[in-house]
Image (spheres, grey):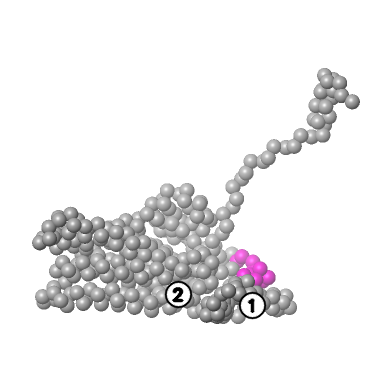
Amino acid sequence: KKVQLQVQRLIDRLPAIAKNLLEDDQMPRAVSRGKDRMVDGLWPDIRTEVMLEVGVFMDKAPAQPGETQRGSDCCRAFFRYHMFPHDKSFWGKARDPFWLVFQLIPLVPVFGVYPAWFAFIFLIIDKSDEFQLVQFILSFKGTAFLSQGLIRALTGFINFMVCVTAIADETHHACAKSGPGTQDFWPTVCGFVLQVLLVWTAFLLLTCSVEKGRVAVKGIVEVELQGAATKKGGYLIYLLWYDLVTFAMSLGMVVAVASTRPNFNVQDWPVKHAVFAGQILYGLLSLPFFMFTLPLLQRVLTHTAPTAYDRRGTCRRFVTPPPRPRPEPPQAVSEEDVNDLYAQIKSVVPLP
């Protein structure tokens, strides 16, 4: 207890030190005050994570026999381990061809592939673990910014060039047949609805999830949870409301265009273009989710400990990969060998 109190006093001095280190005499006062408020706002969450790690260091409980859980079926175990291995770093995963293929699949610019792939991931992950749900939401929305936003916008621009500019006729265009979103209208609509349902379902499951990645402690050291650590998913819950607003904006644009068509015909080509544009807008507005994917910020903002899967498909704590065996350096020349060499040289060359 005394050691814990001393550590707490030391840690509580860090915000003032951080403010002083970030201070600049030529900084505008408004920026300086904003910097101080940012430090004060994030500090309760940073302090909680630091004290939790201190508690683990001082009060770590021994491993229990019950931690050896039964693995999943062979199919899920294969995909779980090759997508989220618990004992490989980034470069270790990059050496796995299956992992590389799994990373490229959601970037395929054919709409329907991206939401279908993440629907498959949602089915195979351990949905009782808090980190797995958080990681699913962040990777889903983060990939949406690339696949559904940037890449989809590029393909839409190319389609628009083909249906308008390539024809080079001011009185005619082919956008009704080959324009953006006209070729894959229903896969676009179904995928759009599917991704929203998956994200919101994962948000709802967070409320009944457990944290499997945090190291157990004996209970002697008590850590007060501050900031967003008292809520499942931390600050991620606020992005749910943001996601609702962006979805309403995208849907509102589609409804506004559909209301201008005769008999509210959703099959008309301007509506298909609007669905395509709404999907791109929804993807580009997923950019704030990228902030939560940064390693240090993710831990502080979501208060989740990393988990992954072993070869049996069991969800467990992430472990640092063991170092590869290195060849032993050649042994230095012994003193006896030096003396022998010196004697041989002396027998040939007269030396003092």
Q: Nearer the viewer, residue 129 or 37?
A: 37
| Residue in the image at 36% along x and 70% along y | 285
Q: Residue furthest front?
A: 26
Q: Which mark is residue 16?
A: 1
Tell me, yes or no, whether the two marked residues, 1 and 2, touch with CB atoms within 8 Å: no
Image quarter where the C terminus lies is: top right
Q: Is residue 238 left or right of residue 345?
A: left
* Magenta segment boundaries in residue numbering: 51-64
Quarter of the figure with residue 204: bottom left
Q: Position of residue 286 (x, y in %)?
A: 37, 69
Magenta stretch prevailing secondary structure: helix
| Residue in the image at 23% along x and 73% along y | 254
Q: Position of residue 65 (x, y in %)?
A: 59, 64
Q: Which residue is mark 2?
A: 236
* Nearer-N-terminus badge (1/2): 1
Q: Position of residue 279 (x, y in %)?
A: 28, 68
